[in-house]
Amino acid sequence: MAKVAFITGASRGIGLSCAKRLARAGWDIVIAAKTTDPHPKLPGTIYTAAEEVRACGGTVLPVACNVRDLESVQAAADATLEKFGRIDAVINNAGALWWRNMDETPMNRFDLVMDVNARGAYAVTEAFLPTMKTQKSGHVINMSPPIDISVIPGHIAYMISKFGMTMICLGLAEEMKDYNICATALWPETVIESAATINYGMGDPSIWRTAEILADATFEILQHPELSNGKAVIDSEFLRSVGYTDFDQYKCRPDSEPMALNSELMSAARS
């Protein structure tokens, strides 16, 4: 029986890359995202993404899912379980980005990043927990960073929301250990090519890696839960730990050197 992954924000970018990577490995995929109609500024819908993933193999279910809306989350979870009868991986990739000082962050922006990032990841995970407990199996992966206080200034609201996602994984692994449910936070070492990278002016392709590095890291985390459970890992570091050596394959430009995603680069992107 094929394993099943539910991936939020999978209509484009990192989420879509993860979906295609798992599909190539024989997984069935749920494309969960808000975009059902073409967006004037962003590529892809849940349906165009589903077509791309089907071409990689496996069965694909596109479902409309707004992680800020509990009814939408539950409906997406119900559709997943009705279709496949199980869930093996919940990948919380949907994200909202706001990199500004606190005095430039009104409450509606704070609520946005909290609702999409921390609360959204919590809601999606909570919706699947009863099934994972019954199965006594499952793995939650949140796209969120190791807790590092150096990146907080200039990004207070955003980092509260992202560290919240990480805390879900660190706590869930301990709380659910009797049910064989694992949890891992995953974050890139470098800037990743994406719509957010482009829209926030985070350099150019010469310092970016492709989303495939996060897709490979996601796959390997699921293959090696004993190495990833209850941890916040960096994509390249984890891949090295399981034997990867060729990181040139992830460069956006073969003759360039990707740049580390750090507080200095994040601050530069805000200016």
Image (spheres, grey):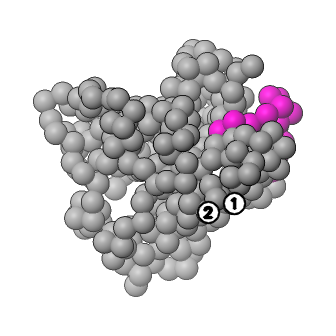
| Residue 111: % across, % down | 59, 72
Q: Is residue 151 left or right of residue 62?
A: left
Q: How many marks?
A: 2
Graded by Cα atoms within 10 Å as few (under 14), some (14 to 19) or many (20 or more), the crowding at tag 2 reads few
Residue at the image position 69 percent from the left and 27 percent from the top: 3
Q: Is residue 190 left or right of residue 47?
A: left
Q: Which residues are magenta?
A: 74-89
Q: Which residue is mark 2?
A: 171
- In magenta segment, residue 78: yes
Residue at the image position 66 percent from the left and 29 percent from the top: 29
On screen, residue 73 above or below 250: below
- In magenta segment, residue 164: no
Residue at the image position 33 percent from the left and 29 percent from the top: 244
Near-viewer residue (145 or 227): 227
Q: Quadrant of the N terminus?
A: top right
Q: Is residue 14 left or right of residue 259?
A: right
- Can residue 16 be seen? no
Q: Amino acid at mark 1?
A: Glu
Q: Assess whether mark 2 and mark 1 are in contact (beta carbons under 8 angstroms).
A: yes
| Residue 82: % across, % down | 86, 33
Residue at the image position 42 percent from the left and 66 percent from the top: 147
Near-viewer residue (133 or 226): 226
Where is residue 24, by image quadrant?
A: top right
Graded by Cα atoms within 10 Å as few (under 14), some (14 to 19) or many (20 or more), the crowding at tag 1 reads few
Q: Which mark is residue 39?
A: none
Near-viewer residue (63 or 175): 175
Q: Quadrant of the C terminus?
A: bottom left
On screen, residue 54 above or below 70: above
Label 1 sits on a secondary structure element that is: helix
Q: Which residue is mark 1?
A: 175
The rendered magenta stretch, by its main secondary structure, is classed as helix
Q: Amino acid at mark 2?
A: Gly
